[in-house]
Image (spheres, helix red, strand yellow):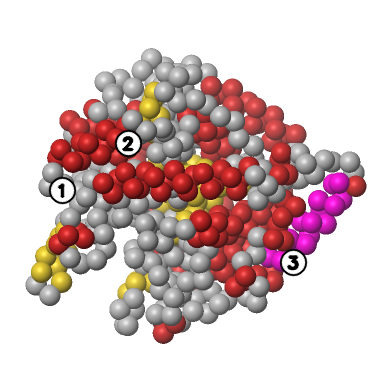
């Protein structure tokens, strides 16, 4: 049984009464009773149980040698406390509904895949700190609140193209994430080990403890914006630009204090931070699916927000069966290969009462393909009058391999896809609701380009990822400034119409 909690968010000083009224009306909408067999947040419950996915084909699942070991590990997790609470997920859904209307902007960020080896308090803190910096830049530029979701505290499992990896004539199980096996190419390391699921739960719990402490213990206070700059960012161009913005925020806070606004107000000293991951390992997700004591509805309590990738979103598949019955807000990755009719059908299945904030569609295409294919998907959703939040993932459609053997993502390609996303939505009169980035607070050299001008030859200097390449702190903050500038320009163009 879960309990509910209340969190407090930062809101910009420019938020107005019209938005407040809109938010209150939306909150009432999301809390009203749904149709028979539909939860108040939009989950489809007819014939659904936390185990009904087991009657469907489940793709991308590890092949465990010892099923008794797996059952014991999952039972152990099932007997442990939930990682997040149902009330927090409902809180998030209301914020996502705001973003879908243009009254907020959503920032997803974090590792491609979390690892056991790199888990330290300072790595969690540094990624969290960059997300705070990005949110301040975006809030200041866009004039709307930023909903912060970390690819943290559970983003371990990764889908693979093949079950086996072959090197030098030797074939072993593919690496599927630290919660399943290890990256070293040995038979023992690549054996899926159920004990790793428990270790992943423990690390997620520790990460969440840190995130909650940072969010509510004063670290995220707006009066600390000058303190969030990372040491290695001090000499970077975007570090200087952020410092300039931080000084302007400080001046605004001083002005508010002079007007009698209390700096100790929770809105100034705390923030809401939510977690998200791809719900790939269905046994693990089932073990953390809990019945909320206040609503008698089921929630996936491994994270506040769960998403499903392209490899596992088959309408009749096990993942979609699991997703339709949990009351969390959920995301679906779509690409240039997605057809409008199929996406509309899937959204209707997952959200039969069309509840705002329930569904996020995350496009991953590359800039050129996005301009060609996203409009037809937007048209299909609009014609069906469906409530969705549109988010862009500019990372996965822009991965290339260099001549020196490194996987990388050119910063300019990532930037161009984000700008294409904004451009398409502005032309169609719809809302570009957020961005989904793979990034880190570490000073890595994994994505080329940006004002830090990382070249192909620089990649080997600090290439630390054991999965896909991530933006470093400077590149992530540079993107935040570019997005803030474009969002502000869009706002001014709307006002001028």
Q: Does dot 2 land on a helix, a strand or a loop?
A: helix
- In the displayed structure, does residue 93 sit left or right of residue 280? right
Q: Does dot 3 land on a helix, a strand or a loop?
A: helix
Residue 105 covered by magenta stretch: no
Q: State the residue position of label 1.
A: 63
Residue 253 covered by magenta stretch: yes
Q: State the residue position of label 3.
A: 244
Q: Quadrant of the N terminus?
A: top left
Q: Position of residue 205 (x, y in %)?
A: 44, 43
Query: Tag on residue 77?
Result: 2
Q: Is residue 260 visible?
A: yes
Tell me which corner region of the image, top left, top right, bottom left or bottom right, holds residue 242.
Answer: bottom right
Please report the residue visible at 45 percent of the width from the left and 26 percent of the height from the top. 2
Tell me which corner region of the image, top left, top right, bottom left or bottom right, holds residue 326.
Answer: top left
Q: Nearer the viewer, residue 116 or 63?
A: 116
Give the mark, 2 or 1, whose residue is nearer the N terminus: 1
Q: Position of residue 333 (x, y in %)?
A: 37, 48
Crowding around mark 3 (Cα neighbors within 10 Å: few <14, some 14 to 19, many 20+) is few
Please report the residue visible at 32 percent of the width from the left and 44 percent of the height from the top. 198
- Calculate the distance from the C-alpha at mark 1 to the C-alpha at mark 3: 53 Å
Q: Nearer the viewer, residue 223 or 378?
A: 223
Name the main secondary structure of what is drawn in magenta: helix
418, above or below 32, in the image: below
Which stretch appears magenta?
A: 242-257
- Calculate the distance from the C-alpha at mark 2 to the C-alpha at mark 3: 47 Å
């Amino acid at each position: 049984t879960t309990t509910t909690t209340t969190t407090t968010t930062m809101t910009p000083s420019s938020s107005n009464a019209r938005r407040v009224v809109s938010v209150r009306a939306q909150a009432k909408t999301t809390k009203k009773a749904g149709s028979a067999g539909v939860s108040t947040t939009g989950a489809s419950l007819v014939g659904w149980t936390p185990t009904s996915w087991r009657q469907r084909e489940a793709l991308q699942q590890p092949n465990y040698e010892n099923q008794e070991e797996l059952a014991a590990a999952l039972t152990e997790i099932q007997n442990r406390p939930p990682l997040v609470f149902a009330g927090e997920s409902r809180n998030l859904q209301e914020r996502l509904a705001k973003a879908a209307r243009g009254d907020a902007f959503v920032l997803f960020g974090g590792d491609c895949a979390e690892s056991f080896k790199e888990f330290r308090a300072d790595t969690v803190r540094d990624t969290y700190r960059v997300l705070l910096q990005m949110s301040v830049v975006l809030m200041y530029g866009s004039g709307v609140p930023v909903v912060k979701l970390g690819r943290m505290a559970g983003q371990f499992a990764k889908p693979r193209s093949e079950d086996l990896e072959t090197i030098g004539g030797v074939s072993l199980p593919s690496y599927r994430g630290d919660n399943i096996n290890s990256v070293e190419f040995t038979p023992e390391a690549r054996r899926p080990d159920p004990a790793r699921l428990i270790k992943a739960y423990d690390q997620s719990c520790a990460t969440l403890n840190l995130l909650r402490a940072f969010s509510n213990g004063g670290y995220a206070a707006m009066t600390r914006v000058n303190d969030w700059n990372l040491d290695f960012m001090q000499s970077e161009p975007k570090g200087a630009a952020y410092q300039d913005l931080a000084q302007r925020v400080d001046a605004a806070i001083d002005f508010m204090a002079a007007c009698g606004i209390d700096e100790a107000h929770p809105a100034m000293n705390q923030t809401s931070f939510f977690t998200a991951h791809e719900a790939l390992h269905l046994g693990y997700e089932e073990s953390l699916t809990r019945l909320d004591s206040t609503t008698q509805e089921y929630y996936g309590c491994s994270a506040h927000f769960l998403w499903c990738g392209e490899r596992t979103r088959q309408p009749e598949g096990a993942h979609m069966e699991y997703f339709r019955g949990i009351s969390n807000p959920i995301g679906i990755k779509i690409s240039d290969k997605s057809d409008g009719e199929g996406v509309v059908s899937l959204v209707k299945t997952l959200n039969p009462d069309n509840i705002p904030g329930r569904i996020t569609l995350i496009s991953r295409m590359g800039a050129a393909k996005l301009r060609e294919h996203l409009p037809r998907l937007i048209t299909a959703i609009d014609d069906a009058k469906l409530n969705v939040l549109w988010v862009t993932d500019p990372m996965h459609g822009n991965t290339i391999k260099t001549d020196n053997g490194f996987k990388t993502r050119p910063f300019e390609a990532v930037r161009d896809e984000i700008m294409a996303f904004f451009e398409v939505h502005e032309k169609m009169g719809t809302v570009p609701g957020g961005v989904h980035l793979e990034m880190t607070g570490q000073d890595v050299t994994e994505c080329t380009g940006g004002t830090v001008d990382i070249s192909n030859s620089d990649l080997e200097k600090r290439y630390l990822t054991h999965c896909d390449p991530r933006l470093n702190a400077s590149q992530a903050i540079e993107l935040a400034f570019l997005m803030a500038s474009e969002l502000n320009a869009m706002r001014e163009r709307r006002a001028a119409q």
